[in-house]
Amino acid sequence: MPVRPENKIRYPADWRAISDRIRFDRAGGRCECVGECGEDHGGRCVQRHGLEHTETGSRVVLTTAHRDHQPEHCDETNLFAACQKCHLRYDADHHRANAARTREARRTAGMDPLFELAPLGSPAPALQDHEAEEMS
């Protein structure tokens, strides 16, 4: 998975070489997940880099996952090669927790307009006079 620009500082300068070594030298271009993602593969996941994913039909892009979700921790025991499906499933709880923290921070800072919307099924609030004028 591509490294987000805001997280690049957390990865070592030689991250690409580390990732390539894990994905292609150690893993041989094959997903190393043996169920860490929560799916029973019946052993090691069969997905191979560059080939069609047997379940999704998309092209497999082998990634390097951090077991502890800490990009700074690049010890080989903390890393495993994962197809995009296994990597996303493995990180799902971590992503949910981060998203919840972000939503809460925005809500408490009054920064997220989504929290100002009326509940589903309720009528939309009436526009204030100045808002109606701006729209016309």
Image (cartoon, rainbow, N blue to C red):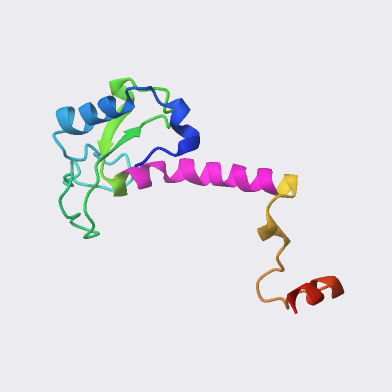
- Rendering quarter of residue 122: bottom right
Residue 100 forms part of the magenta stretch: yes
Magenta-highlighted stretch: main secondary structure? helix
Q: Nearer the viewer, residue 40 or 123?
A: 123
Horizontally, residue 102 falls left or right of residue 44, namely: right
Horizontally, residue 20 falls left or right of residue 107, namely: left
Q: Residue at x 67, y 47 (%)?
A: 106
- What range is drawn magenta here? 87-106
Q: Could you say where residue 128 lies in the image, as x and y percent from the top left?
A: 84, 72
Q: Could you say where residue 48 lies in the image, as x and y percent from the top left?
A: 16, 45
Q: Is residue 126 visible?
A: no
Q: Could you say where residue 60 lies in the image, as x and y percent from the top left?
A: 22, 49
Horizontally, residue 73 falls left or right of residue 43, namely: right
Quarter occupied by the C terminus: bottom right
- Rendering quarter of residue 4: top left
Quarter occupied by the N terminus: top left
Q: Residue at x 36, y 31 (%)?
A: 66
Q: Residue at x 25, y 59 (%)?
A: 56
Q: Is residue 21 visible?
A: yes
Circle count: 0
Q: Could you say where residue 41 lies in the image, as x and y percent from the top left?
A: 21, 47
Residue 12 forms part of the magenta stretch: no
Residue farthest to the right, as pictured: 129
